[in-house]
Image (cartoon, rainbow, N blue to C red):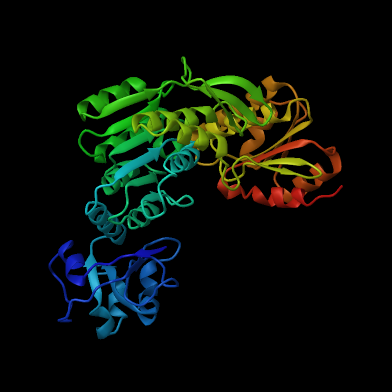
Amino acid sequence: MIAPFEYSLSTILSLFSKDWHWEQTENPTFQWITTSSVETKDRTLFVPLRGTRDGHEFISDALAKGALAFLCEKNHPILKTLSESERNRAILVPDCLVALGKLANYHRNRFQPIVLAITGSSGKTTTKDLLGGLFGFLNSKTLVVTEKNYNNEIGLPFTLFRITEKTRVVICELGMNHRGEIVRLSHIAEPTHALITNIGSAHIENLKSRQTIAEEKIDIIQGMRPHSVLFVPDDLEFLSRVKLRTKQKNTKLIVWNHKKKPNLKTIQVKPNGFQLEWNGQKVDWKLPGEKLLSNVRGMLAVGIHFQINPHQILKTIETYKSPDKRLNINRGYYTIIDDCYNANPESMLSSIGATGQFAENKNVVWILGSMKELGKFSKYYHEEVGKEIQKIGKGILLGFGEETKPMVKKVPNARCFLDVEELIQFVKTNVPKKSVLLVKGSRSMKMERIVMALETFKG
C-alpha cells in the first residue's frame, strides 16, 4: 500500500525516540508512505512490516527506488548488513507496525472530520458501503471510505492517510482476528461515531467465547472521542453490556429497531429482495436475505442522526449493489449465487436464507466450504448449518472440506468432497440446468474456483 504523506523528517523524528543516528543536516520532506518496496517512489518513507516475509529484507530495494528514509526496528539484524550510508537513513522504532499506527493517528488528529468506524462479526462491508452511499453527495475530496477490506492495523492507517483539510467524513471498517485488536484500531482512528453490526462467532477459535467476542467488539468505544455516538441494533447480543460500557464512557447510545417495530418496514418479500417503506415512501432493496435488512436499518439510523436528506437515504437503498463475491448472481446454465468471499456461522445462515428466498421453487444446491477459525466449536457450528438446511427440507447439500462432514451428516443425501475437481465434476454430471447454486466458504477454501468452473459450463 502507498499513500500521500507530506511531512518533514523533523516531524517524523519528533514522534519517536530522540536517540537518532541521522547525520543529514537538511530537513527533507516526504511525499509518500508505503509498506511495499515495489510501490516505492522518490521521497517515500518506507515502513517494513513482518508478514510471510520480513519487510526489513527489502530496505535496500526501497532505498534504491528513491526512498528518502525507512523505519527500522531497533537492533534488527538487517542493520548489520546495510552500508553506512543506508544505515544513516534509518528511523529506529521499537515496532514498525505500532509506529505506522502512531503516524496515522498523528495525521488523523491534524484534522477534524466526522470519523465513523464500523465493526461486527458480519455485515461490516455491506454497512460500510451503505454509509458510503449515504454520504455520497460529498465528493472524493471530502469523503474517505475504506477501500476493499483494508480494515486491519495496516489497512486502517492507509485509509486515514487519505484525510486532507477538505475531508468532512471518514467511514472506516475495523476488523479483527485476536483479542485486543479493536482497541488498538479504535485508538488509531479515534472515531467520533461508531456502529456495531452484530456479535457472532467469527474468530471464536482465537477468542474462545461469544462473550469475549462481544467485549472485543464493544472495545471500539475505548478510542472514541468524548461525547461520541455508538449505533447498535436492538437484537444485539450482550446489549445490556453495551449500555453499561457506553454509560461508563459517557458515549451516547442509539439503538436502531430491526426486530421490534422497525421504522423501515417490509411491505413485500420478492425473490430478488424486498419492497420497503419509510416515512410513507416505498423503496426497493435489491438483495435477498432478511438479515441484511439490519444493515440497511443501521444506515437509516445514521442518516436520521445526521439529518441526511430523505431523498438521499432512499436513493442509497435503491441503488446499492453488493461488492465482488458477496451475493453476486451469475446467470447461465446454472444460476450461481457467488458469496465465496468468506464465511462464518452467521453469514452462512444469512446466505442460506437469502438463497431460499431467491430460488423460490427452483432446484437449490448448497455448495458450502469449511468455516475456519472455529477451533473446538467447529463441529457444533457446522452441525448448526446442517440443521438449518435440513429444516428447509429441499435442495442438495454438497460440502467441501474436512470440517463440513458434521454438516453433511445432518442432511439426508448430502455429500462431502475433499477434492475440488471431483466436486465440480459431480455438479456438472448430476445437477440439472437452471438450478440455483449457492457457493460459499471461508477465504482459505478458495471457493471462487468452483464459481469459475461452473459459470462457464454450457452443459
| Residue 177: percent from left, percent from top | 42, 44
| Residue 104: percent from left, percent from top | 28, 56
Q: Is residue 144 left or right of residue 367?
A: left
Quarter of the figure that contains the N terminus: bottom left
Give the camera-side residue of 79 and 305. Answer: 305
Q: Is residue 141 visible?
A: yes
Q: Is residue 418 left or right of residue 184?
A: right
| Residue 314: percent from left, percent from top | 50, 32
Q: Is residue 300 above or below residue 453?
A: above
Q: Is residue 35 above or below residue 60?
A: above
The residue sitting at the left extreme is 18
Q: Is residue 221 left or right of residue 458?
A: left
Q: Quadrant of residue 99?
A: bottom left
Give the camera-side residue of 25 and 229. Answer: 229
Q: Is residue 383 visible?
A: no
Q: Residue at x 18, y 81 (%)?
A: 24
| Residue 180: percent from left, percent from top | 32, 42
Q: Residue at x 28, y 69 (%)?
A: 72
Q: Is residue 184 left or right of residue 204?
A: left
Give the camera-side residue of 111 and 142. Answer: 142
Q: Is residue 215 above or below residue 451?
A: above
Give the camera-side residue of 121 and 125. Answer: 125
Q: Quadrant of residue 58?
A: bottom left
Q: Residue at x 75, y 52 (%)?
A: 453
Q: Residue at x 40, y 47 (%)?
A: 138
Q: How many marks?
A: 0
